[in-house]
Image: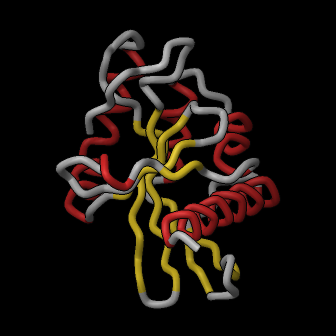
């Protein structure tokens, strides 16, 4: 089995696990543990969960729709040959609304540092062309940690792009 498909399925399980804990407790869950696709123990952490929830709200994104997109259907693996200069891997939600992208610690730290001002900016400049980051997560499977961000898919819509660049 393709390791990216397997990781995508573990990510989907991670998102579903976080969403289930959120629904049960009524507040954002920062960390959850579960058994992954191959029975491995997995730990998922949501970074700045409350702030990202505020950002999603400021962008008019309903929490239910966000989690449904991430959890309901398997994530579609992006083309490994077009991972871009960053070397990041990509998955897309089946409804094509969101992109899940692997990240690095320095990128996540920077995103967390600017998150408050970024949220304020996006809330007051709704037509801005800035990419919308809707969540940041780590998924630990066995001894390997995968850092990801969830972003809006800027290519979502009625037209199919001919070429896509990272």
- Please identify the residue farthest to the right as the structure is shown: 24
Q: Is residue 113 something that shows in the picture?
A: yes
Give the residue drawn at x 44%, y 90%: 143
Q: Quadrant of residue 122?
A: top left
Q: Position of residue 79 (x, y in %)?
A: 41, 49
**22 or 66, which is in the foreground?**
66
72 to the left or right of 4? right
23 to the left or right of 58? right
**15 or 126, which is in the foreground?**
15
Q: Position of residue 94 (x, y in %)?
A: 65, 40
Q: Position of residue 137 (x, y in %)?
A: 47, 60
Give the residue drawn at x 66%, y 78%: 36
Tally of marks = 0
Colouring scheme applied when the structure was drawn:
secondary structure
Q: Is residue 101 something that shows in the picture?
A: no
Q: Position of residue 22 (x, y in %)?
A: 72, 56
Q: Which quadrant does the N terminus fall into?
A: bottom right
Give the residue drawn at x 63%, y 55%: 28
Can you say whether 127 is above or below 10 in the image? above
**149 or 72, which is in the foreground?**
72
152 to the left or right of 97? left
Can you say whether 41 is above or below 70 in the image? below
Q: Which quadrant does the C terminus fall into?
A: top left
Give the residue drawn at x 67%, y 83%: 38
10 to the left or right of 127? right
Q: Quadrant of residue 144?
A: bottom left
């Amino acid at each position: 089995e393709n390791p990216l498909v397997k990781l995508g399925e573990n990510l989907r399980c991670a998102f579903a696990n976080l969403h289930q804990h959120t629904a049960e407790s009524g507040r954002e869950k920062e960390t959850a543990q579960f058994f992954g696709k191959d029975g491995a123990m997995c730990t998922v952490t949501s970074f700045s969960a409350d702030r990202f929830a505020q950002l999603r709200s400021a962008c008019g994104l309903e929490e239910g729709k966000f989690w449904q997109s991430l959890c309901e259907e398997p994530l579609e693996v992006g083309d490994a040959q077009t991972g871009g200069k960053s070397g990041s891997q990509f998955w897309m939600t089946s409804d094509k609304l969101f992109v899940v992208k692997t990240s690095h610690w320095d990128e996540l730290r920077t995103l967390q540092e600017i998150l408050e001002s970024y949220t304020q900016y996006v809330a007051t400049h709704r037509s801005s062309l800035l990419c919308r980051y809707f969540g940041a997560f780590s998924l630990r499977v066995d001894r390997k940690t995968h850092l990801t961000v969830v972003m809006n898919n800027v290519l979502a819509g009625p037209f199919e792009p001919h070429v896509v660049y990272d």
